[in-house]
Amino acid sequence: MASFNRVYLMGNLTRDPQLSYTPNQTAVVDFGMATNRRWTGQDGSQREETCFVDCRMFGKRAEVINKYCKRGNPLFVEGRLTFDSWEAQDGSKRSKLRVTVENFEFISGGGGGGAGQTHQDSGGMNSNAQHQASEDDIPF
Protein backbone atom coordinates (compact mmCIF):
# COMPACT_ATOMS: atom_id res chain seq x y z
CA MET A 1 0.00 0.00 0.00
CA ALA A 2 1.34 3.45 -0.92
CA SER A 3 1.65 6.16 1.71
CA PHE A 4 2.10 9.92 1.67
CA ASN A 5 3.20 12.12 4.57
CA ARG A 6 3.34 15.81 3.67
CA VAL A 7 2.34 18.88 5.72
CA TYR A 8 1.98 22.50 4.58
CA LEU A 9 1.35 25.19 7.20
CA MET A 10 1.22 28.95 7.14
CA GLY A 11 0.87 30.73 10.43
CA ASN A 12 2.64 32.71 13.11
CA LEU A 13 5.32 31.57 15.52
CA THR A 14 3.93 31.17 19.04
CA ARG A 15 7.31 31.39 20.75
CA ASP A 16 10.88 32.31 19.93
CA PRO A 17 12.79 29.46 18.25
CA GLN A 18 15.02 27.40 20.53
CA LEU A 19 18.30 26.29 18.97
CA SER A 20 20.31 23.32 20.21
CA TYR A 21 22.84 20.92 18.74
CA THR A 22 23.00 17.14 18.57
CA PRO A 23 26.14 15.39 19.88
CA ASN A 24 27.55 15.42 16.33
CA GLN A 25 26.94 19.21 16.15
CA THR A 26 23.89 19.17 13.85
CA ALA A 27 21.76 22.25 14.52
CA VAL A 28 18.19 21.59 15.73
CA VAL A 29 15.59 24.31 16.14
CA ASP A 30 12.23 23.85 17.86
CA PHE A 31 9.41 26.35 17.48
CA GLY A 32 5.66 26.50 17.71
CA MET A 33 3.21 27.75 15.11
CA ALA A 34 -0.43 28.76 15.28
CA THR A 35 -2.76 28.50 12.30
CA ASN A 36 -6.25 29.98 12.23
CA ARG A 37 -9.37 28.73 10.51
CA ARG A 38 -12.34 31.04 10.04
CA TRP A 39 -15.78 30.04 8.84
CA THR A 40 -19.44 30.95 9.07
CA GLY A 41 -21.54 28.61 11.21
CA GLN A 42 -24.96 27.29 10.20
CA ASP A 43 -26.52 29.96 12.38
CA GLY A 44 -24.65 32.69 10.43
CA SER A 45 -22.21 33.51 13.21
CA GLN A 46 -18.52 33.95 12.45
CA ARG A 47 -16.42 31.19 13.97
CA GLU A 48 -12.69 30.79 14.41
CA GLU A 49 -10.43 28.05 15.71
CA THR A 50 -6.70 28.07 16.27
CA CYS A 51 -4.46 25.03 15.87
CA PHE A 52 -1.13 25.00 17.72
CA VAL A 53 1.62 22.89 16.16
CA ASP A 54 5.12 22.01 17.40
CA CYS A 55 7.79 22.11 14.67
CA ARG A 56 11.41 20.99 14.45
CA MET A 57 14.06 21.56 11.77
CA PHE A 58 17.60 20.24 11.41
CA GLY A 59 20.77 21.53 9.74
CA LYS A 60 21.89 24.92 8.47
CA ARG A 61 18.31 26.08 7.84
CA ALA A 62 17.62 25.56 11.55
CA GLU A 63 20.22 28.22 12.29
CA VAL A 64 18.56 30.57 9.77
CA ILE A 65 15.17 30.18 11.47
CA ASN A 66 16.76 30.77 14.86
CA LYS A 67 18.55 33.90 13.65
CA TYR A 68 15.75 35.59 11.69
CA CYS A 69 12.48 34.43 13.26
CA LYS A 70 10.86 35.34 16.54
CA ARG A 71 7.51 35.02 18.25
CA GLY A 72 4.71 36.50 16.14
CA ASN A 73 6.52 36.25 12.78
CA PRO A 74 4.56 34.68 9.93
CA LEU A 75 6.15 31.63 8.29
CA PHE A 76 5.24 29.05 5.65
CA VAL A 77 6.61 25.56 6.32
CA GLU A 78 6.60 22.28 4.44
CA GLY A 79 7.50 18.99 6.06
CA ARG A 80 6.25 15.69 7.38
CA LEU A 81 4.51 14.47 10.52
CA THR A 82 6.73 12.72 13.03
CA PHE A 83 5.46 10.73 16.02
CA ASP A 84 7.46 11.28 19.22
CA SER A 85 6.98 9.14 22.33
CA TRP A 86 8.77 9.16 25.67
CA GLU A 87 8.37 8.24 29.30
CA ALA A 88 7.66 11.12 31.68
CA GLN A 89 9.41 11.53 35.03
CA ASP A 90 6.37 10.07 36.78
CA GLY A 91 6.66 6.93 34.63
CA SER A 92 3.66 7.65 32.42
CA LYS A 93 3.97 7.25 28.68
CA ARG A 94 3.66 10.44 26.62
CA SER A 95 3.44 11.07 22.90
CA LYS A 96 2.72 13.80 20.38
CA LEU A 97 2.79 14.54 16.69
CA ARG A 98 5.29 17.13 15.49
CA VAL A 99 6.05 18.61 12.07
CA THR A 100 9.61 17.93 10.95
CA VAL A 101 10.23 20.92 8.67
CA GLU A 102 12.06 20.32 5.40
CA ASN A 103 11.40 23.64 3.61
CA PHE A 104 10.28 27.06 4.74
CA GLU A 105 9.49 30.45 3.30
CA PHE A 106 9.56 33.82 4.98
CA ILE A 107 6.21 35.60 4.58
CA SER A 108 6.04 39.36 4.02
CA GLY A 109 4.62 41.36 6.86
CA GLY A 110 7.02 39.76 9.33
CA GLY A 111 9.44 42.68 9.07
CA GLY A 112 12.00 40.72 7.09
CA GLY A 113 11.16 41.50 3.48
CA GLY A 114 12.03 37.93 2.51
CA ALA A 115 8.78 36.95 0.83
CA GLY A 116 9.14 34.47 -1.95
CA GLN A 117 12.36 33.01 -0.59
CA THR A 118 12.18 29.23 -0.28
CA HIS A 119 14.69 27.50 1.95
CA GLN A 120 15.13 23.80 1.42
CA ASP A 121 16.81 21.25 3.62
CA SER A 122 18.90 18.68 1.79
CA GLY A 123 16.28 16.01 2.46
CA GLY A 124 13.38 17.91 0.88
CA MET A 125 12.25 18.30 -2.70
CA ASN A 126 10.76 21.46 -4.17
CA SER A 127 10.98 21.87 -7.94
CA ASN A 128 9.32 25.30 -7.67
CA ALA A 129 11.97 26.70 -5.35
CA GLN A 130 12.71 30.26 -6.36
CA HIS A 131 15.89 30.41 -4.34
CA GLN A 132 17.91 28.13 -2.11
CA ALA A 133 19.80 29.91 0.63
CA SER A 134 23.31 29.10 1.65
CA GLU A 135 25.00 30.27 4.85
CA ASP A 136 26.26 33.42 3.09
CA ASP A 137 23.01 34.07 1.23
CA ILE A 138 20.50 35.20 3.85
CA PRO A 139 17.44 36.92 2.37
CA PHE A 140 17.79 40.05 4.49
Image (spheres, helix red, strand yellow):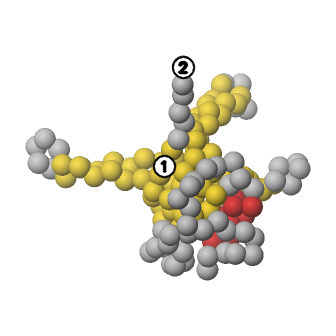
**x, y percentage for residue 123?**
69, 48
Q: Are marks 2 and 1 in contact (CB under 8 Å)?
A: no
Asked which secondary structure carries label 2, the reply is loop
* Front position among marks 2 and 1: 2
Q: Which of pointers 2 and 1 lies earlier in the amino acid sequence?
A: 2
Which amino acid type is marked by label 2? Met
Left or right of 39: which side holds 135?
A: right
Q: In terms of image quadrants, where is residue 88?
A: top right
Residue that numbered label 1 is attached to: 8
106 or 94, which is in the foreground?
106
Residue 106 higher or lower than 88, as above or below:
below
Image disc number at residue 39: none
As drawn, the residue found furthest toward the top would be 1
87 or 40, which is in the foreground?
40
Left or right of 47: which side holds 112?
A: right
**x, y percentage for residue 90?**
70, 28
Left or right of 90: which side holds 22?
A: right
As drawn, the residue found furthest toward the front would be 127
Identify the residue at horizontal 53%, vertical 33% (top origin): 4
Which amino acid type is marked by label 1? Tyr
As drawn, the residue found furthest toward the right would be 24
Q: In terms of image quadrants, where is residue 89?
A: top right
Confirm whether residue 15 shows in the render. no
Q: In terms of image quadrants, where is residue 117?
A: bottom right
Image quadrant where one finds the N terminus: top right
Crowdedness near tag 1: few (<14), some (14–19) or many (≥20) residues, C-alpha within 10 Å: few
Identify the residue at horizontal 57%, vertical 38% (top origin): 81
> Separation of disc 2 and disc 1 at Cα?
23 Å
Confirm whether residue 74 shows in the render. yes
Residue that numbered label 2 is attached to: 1
18 or 28, which is in the foreground?
28
Residue 113 higher or lower than 125, as above or below:
below
